Image (cartoon, grey):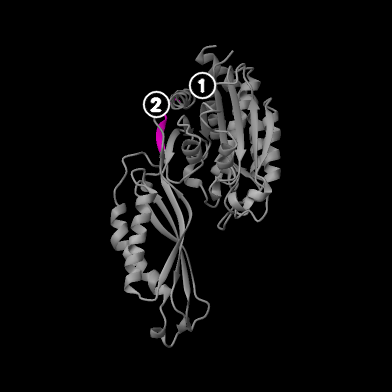
Amino acid sequence: MDELELKNRIDAAMEKLSDELTNFAVRFFSIPTQNPPGYNYDKVTQCAGEEMKKAGMEITYLKVPDERLEELAPQSEGHPRINVIGTKEGQMHRPLLHITGHYDVVPEGTGWTHDPYACDIEDGKIYARGSADQKSGIVSEIFAARILKEACIELKGTLLTSATADEETGGFAGVGYMVEQGYFTKESTDYAVITECLDVDKVCLGHRGTMWFEIEITGKQAHGSMPSEGVSPIEFANRLMDRIDSDIQPLLKDITPLPVQPPACRKSTLTVTMLRAGEKLNTIPQTCTMGFDWRLNPELSVKWAEEQFVKVCEAVKSEMPGSDYKINMHMATDPTLVPNNTDVVKAFLASGKMFLGRDMEFSISPGEEDQKFIIKNGHLDQCIVYGPGRLTLAHKSDEYAVIEEMKTAAKVMALSACKLLGTL
């Protein structure tokens, strides 16, 4: 079957399935899966699994053992962690393509003009928390499999789709656990695609580095009328911010030549995101805690960043006898980057051009995602990120997914599967 015939059959199949895609998206988006703590994971995986069955896939539910929740999902509050995998075995077991996305979403927050789970449809957009980031990608990957079944296209190799847990809190109970269990490794998998919200017309090759950490500053409690009798951890925090501005921020001014999207994110950023101190207006507190989000350009490393932060902390400590600090690292991930000329990259570039009518662009994600596990733990560099969600809508109020973009992404994934796995 030549490429044009494949494209025409995929187009026709998607049109037949258009209403079903929209209906599934509404059902899927309407399930609140806020993480933390991780609500309704059982319901959302059942919903995805039932749709995968319609594509003729064998379904596996991979649950994290309860005794490992504290280790892999410390913010779970005991809620289960479940990953669902659909498998369509080809004429041969290999090559194997595994397309995956995460179903957990951030809390809805405020400022919405739509109910975040009512899934209002206006002008071809479905409004819902997590619609862009990144349940829309899961819709597209499942419907890529459904397109192939509807179009009676049989693959030589094997196609897997999965919906995974906990990316929004690091992914350790999701793709991290799946890699540990033998999925997404070079021994089990030939090609991997993560359906994150990096835009329907871009192939993402990696992500910036991420450090999420807190510093717990200890001083000496005293009466507010006699501050000289104490050591203020708030003053330590104030001096630390000054040191960060004078000593670290100038080191972060370089703009990476790599295509991080959006372009404003091509500089590394160190941002204070939390500040907790004090219990009473007339008391110098004993402790102060600051939280930080540090994003590192691909040219930098976690080790380098940690060294810079310790330097400024030690400088402030030396100025304030009686003070101390402790850094608690919640997550530290080095930047990730894969080659731009692998087979999976070439397949998606060619398929994207067929359905978009223009060349696709490369991108680098501004934030970390599950690619880190596949590349660093699974040692599989044939791994890209491609999905229909719009990156600039992630975590915002009035988040939405565009129906036509979900359909386009599904077609790109279906044709790419044909290119990578072969057809009968």
Quarter of the image for residue 423 reads top right
Name the residue that disc number 2 marks. 341
Mark 2 Cα shell of 10 Å, populated few (<14), some (14-19), many (≥20): few
Q: Position of residue 101 (x, y in %)?
A: 57, 38
Q: Which residues are magenta?
A: 357-363
Name the residue that disc number 1 marks. 420
**The C terminus: image quadrant:** top right
Q: Is residue 277 left or right of residue 257?
A: right
Residue ID at (41%, 46%): 209
Res 33 visible? no
**The N terminus: image quadrant:** top right
Q: Magenta stretch containing residue 362, yes or no? A: yes
Q: Magenta stretch containing residue 103, yes or no? A: no
Residue ID at (38%, 84%): 228
Q: Nearer the viewer, residue 260 or 23?
A: 260
Q: Position of residue 104 (x, y in %)?
A: 60, 46
Mark 1 Cα shell of 10 Å, populated few (<14), some (14-19), many (≥20): many
Disc 2 + disc 1, Cβ < 8 Å: no
